[in-house]
Amino acid sequence: MSTAAEALRGRPHELFASLRGWGREILHDRAGLAGLALVVLLVAVALAAPLIAPHDPAAQDLRARLLPPVWLDKGSWNHLLGTDHLGRDVLSRLIHGSRVSLAVGVGVVLLAGGFGTVMGLLAGYFGGRTDGFIMRWVDTQVAFPGLLLALVILAVVGPSIVSLIVVLSINGWMVYARMVRGSVLSVRQLPYVEAAEMIGCRSRRVVFRHILPNLVSPLLTLAILEFARIVLAEAALSFLGLGVQPPATSWGLDVASGKEYMFRAWWLVTFPGAAIAATVLGINLLASWIRIASDPQEREKSFARRAVRARRRQA
């Protein structure tokens, strides 16, 4: 009992030590630090959108339509990034559009990631017919074009944020199931898992207490990468008119509404497109850093590269 209590008391210290190690590691990785900064900026802007947006994103002012950004001729300080063809403030629409990207991304990651993880755990741990059924299900759905499936479902149920989250989750759970299944197959033969089974632990306890915690790092990396894919997918579906509907705003919807004015008012597509690109870039940089920081071999390679660069500077 005392040994178990000491182990439990030691876990918070181990967690804090691990977090401090990750904090020191990211300070030496400029790409990872830039990715973290972009992701934190996205989250902060999305959460504070009603407070920092200078205008109502749906408010129209036809007298101020197609105003250029403030640094160009005829630009206005009242509309820093200009206005669209209906006189709506571009900056306010960008700020509120980040809320849609964040909401859809988080919703799909939680829904698809949760379902795919459970399916992967069942397939990898129990094997046999369970594994065969789940993997054939995955193969069948992967063989079907995901975009076509999304278009069909959204055309039937109608476009909305909720239906968008459900459709993208249906299209995205398979990658989690495959990754988790492969990891479980490699972990279930380890001594500590076999020992837990030998002392009579239930299958549910073995899976969720002993196997799942070892999958946190690859799952986190995969979830962040999938978040980037979801941002692009949401923008594409909104661009096609099957995502967020007016008067709500979305970066993809703004690109779609501004494409007719691309040569007269380039800022209508440039700023939403830049927001999408910066978000995807930041997420990918952060995911790459997490993959390196959570893998001892990759971490050693990173240390070696930094040591070589330091010696070259000294020379």
Image (cartoon, rainbow, N blue to C red):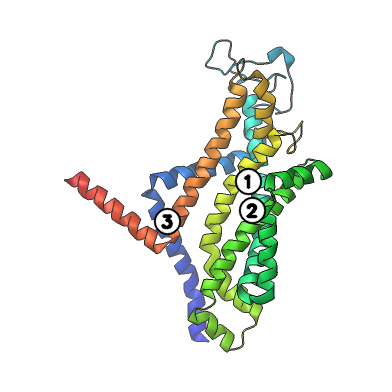
Cα distance between the residues tagged 1 and 2: 8 Å
User: Which residue is found at the position 69% from the left and 73% from the top?
Assistant: 130
Q: Disc 2 on helix, strand or loop?
A: helix
Q: Disc 1 on helix, strand or loop?
A: helix
Q: Alpha-carbon neighbours of circle 2 within 10 Å: few (<14), some, or many (≥20)?
A: many
Q: Label 3 belongs to which residue?
A: 292
Residue 41 appears in the rendering: no
Q: Residue lying farthest bottom?
A: 199
Expressed as whole percent of the image width and height from the top left, the position of residue 33 reads 43, 46
On-image quarter of the C terminus: top left
Q: Label 2 belongs to which residue?
A: 109
Expressed as whole percent of the image width and height from the top left, the position of residue 234 reads 67, 41
Residue 170 or 4: which is nearer the viewer? 170
Residue 222 sits in quarter: bottom right
- Mark 1: amino acid: Ile
Q: Disc 3 on helix, strand or loop?
A: helix
Instruction: Using residue 26 as the reference point, say whether residue 195 is left or right of it.
Output: right
Cα distance between the residues tagged 1 and 3: 23 Å
- On residue 230, the disc is 1
User: Which residue is found at the position 24% from the left and 49% from the top?
Assistant: 310
Q: Are marks 1 and 3 in contact (CB under 8 Å)?
A: no
Residue 133 or 230: which is nearer the viewer? 133
Cα distance between the residues tagged 3 and 2: 21 Å
- Mark 3: amino acid: Ile
The mark nearer the N terminus, 3 or 2, is 2
User: Does 132 appear above or below 155?
Assistant: below
Residue 300 sits in quarter: bottom left
The mark nearer the N terminus, 1 or 2, is 2
Residue 246 appears in the rendering: yes
